[in-house]
Image (tube, grey):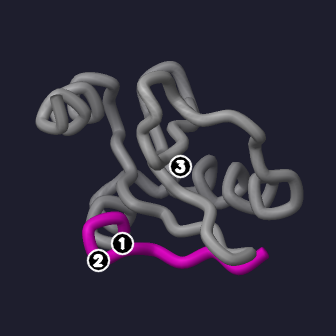
Amino acid sequence: MEVVFSHHAEADFLSLEKQLQKHIKKHLEKLSKMPPRRHMKHGLPWFVEKITKQARLVYRLENECLHVLRCFATHKEYERWYLSFK
């Protein structure tokens, strides 16, 4: 499965520490081989993966392609972004 970064996700990813980038890359490799089967609650059109205790990865699956929407270093950043949709 191909992995594609959105403009925001690419900027987020490049601003992260190198170690966290490595964690995300490994996680994306794993996801591309075995995608999840459930969405978040409330019918939201994306998946959220917990990379570390704080880091989050937001993505969606579309036509055999994994689209990375955003990468967050902390849960607070993710929470702020998520609450903007409510």
Residue 24 within the magenta-colored segment of the rendering = no
- Tell me which segment is drawn in magenta: 1-9
Nearest the viewer among 11 and 66 is 66
Q: What residue lies at 68% left-to-right and 77% top-to-bottom?
A: 63
Task: State how far apart marks 2 and 1 are (Cα).
Answer: 5 Å
- Label 2 neighbourhood size at 10 Å, few (<14), some (14-19), many (20+)? few
Q: What residue lies at 42% left-to-right and 25% top-to-bottom?
A: 42
Position above or below: 86 against 64: above
Q: Earlier in the sequence, mark 2 or mark 3?
A: 2
**In the drawing, what numbered circle is on residue 10?**
1
Q: Quadrant of residue 25?
A: bottom right
Q: Nearer the viewer, mark 2 or mark 3?
A: 2
**In the drawing, what numbered circle is on residue 19?**
3
- Label 1 neighbourhood size at 10 Å, few (<14), some (14-19), many (20+)? some
Q: Give x and y (percent) for residue 40.
A: 52, 29
Along the horizontal axis of the image, is 40 left or right of 28?
left
Position above or below: 41 against 62: above
Q: Earlier in the sequence, mark 3 or mark 1?
A: 1
Residue indicated by mark 2: 7
Q: Amino acid at mark 3?
A: Gln
Q: Secondary structure at mark 2?
A: helix
Q: What residue lies at 52% left-to-right and 68% top-to-bottom?
A: 67
